[in-house]
Amino acid sequence: MNQILILDENTINKIAAGEVVERPASIVKELVENSIDAGSTAITIEIRDGGISYIRVADNGRGMSFQDARLSFERHATSKISTADDLQNIDTLGFRGEALASISAVTQLEMITREKESVSGIHIVNHGGKIVSEKEIGCPEGTTIITKNLFFNTPARLKFLKSSRTETAHISDLVGKLILAHPEISFRYINNGRTIYYSTGDGDLKNAILSVYGKDVVDQLIPVEPTDNLSGIKLWGYLGKPSLARKNRNFQSYYINGRYVKSSLLAESIETAYKPYLTVNLFPWVVLHIEIDPSAIDVNVHPTKTEIRFREEEQIKQYIQQYIAEILKENPYIPVLREDPISPLSINENSSTTMDDAQDSEQLEVFSSISTDSTSFSVDKPSRNIYIVDSNKTSSVVNTMKPKSSIDEDNISTASMNYRYQDNNISRNIAIPLKIVGKIFSTYIVVESQEQCFLVDQHAAHERLLFEKYKKMLSEQDVLTQQLLPPVIIEVTHAEQIIINESLDLFQSLGFEIESFGGRAYAIRGVPMILGNSNVKEFFRELMDNTEEYKKGSNYNLKIDDIIKMSCKAAVKAGDKLSEREILALLKDLIDKKVPMTCPHGRPIMISITKKQLERTFKRIQ
């Protein structure tokens, strides 16, 4: 019995569509690339409902004749190549001849096209790969293709699509990449009747970047001037200063001969060059164009044509890495000191409140910017005494040391701490009294008991305290928000705008007050109190970078991860010089609140060394 069959054309097209049409963004990509290959100088992209119900791509390119328009729906029908030898020298974005056949197989498609020399155009309607009608029509030069009801004849695939907002975000990200790929083309991108992106098409890449990312990004760019090398590679574009680095690679755009590609080789080359300038887990912002001999690359790797292979990978990698490293070296980055919009909290100098009666909200006050210039304990304000109680002796007075800072006393009176008489013994709620001995390396606090001593990591301890405090606020729905004057304004891409709009309730539950500020700009008017004096704009962008990843988990896990980030940002750092009172308050809270002895990341807060261990180490006992 014969078991092998020849599949019919309709089935073949639907199978091919599975590779080419992954989601609505795939349709936009294929249609826009066809428009670019047709020599268009203006392209309009319009979508509705994330492209699921409606996509329109209109251009002013060469257009097609009646015969070519009908033939374009056949598989492997293309004007880009004619023989297999042409695959070795591809200089167009499309060449496989699968796009229109695959798209029409899973949509209800209309094509309106007219050649430049023709008096009239052609209107073809194709549903599910079958031409329903075709007629002559009056229309402008160029081609317009409309797709409706994606996967109308394959409902099983329709179920695998995400929400319309998610699909819109994918399309918005793609359109942004296309604008940066071809600054010489004017793009207009419309979503549900509203224009999102518009580029002038004047050929200036910087203006294209402005239309996608806004002026905040444009002000922080390093140009890569067009240059050739002996290998025939030409680089041009823009590098982001280290201040633009993000938590993921979504802001890296690489183009080979005008084609947007995803390449681990290019990403590794750039990131290696940036390594001396960025901290761990940060990725550079890049828009880089590479022009190379088409015979030196292979773009026929996957139907989506976003993957690429180089014939001389190591040579290209070394050249790009060295060239970018030289540019960064010639443009040293010096961070700009910006005035922090959040005023540091302070204690009223005339306040009569004692430390024991202080509210939890004063925890941030204890770790303000008052510090000493040495590892020894000192008081920053003259004519004050600190009473310290030894674990085995009565109270004694420690002479105050005059501050080594040159800051005028009159100018810091309102921001400085109120140094009240404090008991340095922290034996409350514990059986064995502890005594603060000192601090080493401006990081570890040394605390002594009768039979052992402890080394406390000041950053890990403070981070855990802030974490527990904020987690309690969230569970009780009592998050404290601090108002910003003036508000912080951020400008985002359309994909990020969708994330913000979809996550407004989440951001508000975390203590942010955000509202639209027109266009793709937002005003952050309030932030969680726990953030303290952290950089609001930087932290908010970090939250956005991870929002999509968090959505895969539970809402609770999302909040816990955000609390860890905020507590780490606001906590005192290793190397910060703390005053005696700050150390005292930190240790008292650590003991009184009975928090776990690890930071939210799992690192230990303190380690202990017993008296016997020391005596054995020094050979005092056996």
Image (cartoon, rainbow, N blue to C red):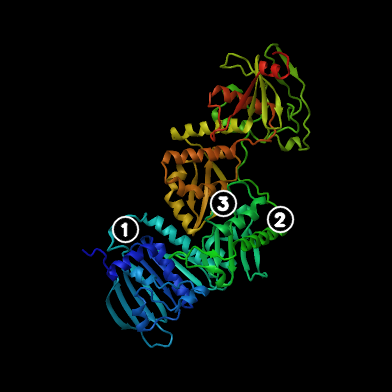
* Mark 3: amino acid: Arg
* Mark 2: amino acid: Pro
Please give the residue where the numbered disc 3 appears in the rendered image.
246
Residue 597, picture quadrant: top right
Which residue is at 50% across, 58% downward? 493
* Mark 1: amino acid: Leu
The tag earlier along the polypeptide, 1 or 3, is 1
Residue 74, picture quadrant: bottom left
The tag earlier along the polypeptide, 3 or 2, is 3
Rendered location of residue 26, percent (x, y)? 41, 64
Which residue is at 55% across, 63% downward? 254
How crowded is the residue under tag 3: few (<14 C-alpha within 10 Å), some, or many (20+)? many
Which residue is at 71% across, 25% downward? 438
Residue farthest to the top, as pictured? 393
Which quadrant is home to the N terminus?
bottom left
Q: Nearer the viewer's eye, disc 1 or disc 3?
A: 1
217 above or below 199? Answer: above
Residue 154 vs residue 430, the one in the foreground:
154
Please give the residue where the numbered disc 1 appears in the rendered image.
158
Please give the residue where the numbered disc 2 appears in the rendered image.
332
The tag earlier along the polypeptide, 2 or 1, is 1
Answer left or right for 118 relative to 470: left
Answer left or right for 384 relative to 526: right
Q: CA distance from mark 2 to mark 1?
A: 50 Å
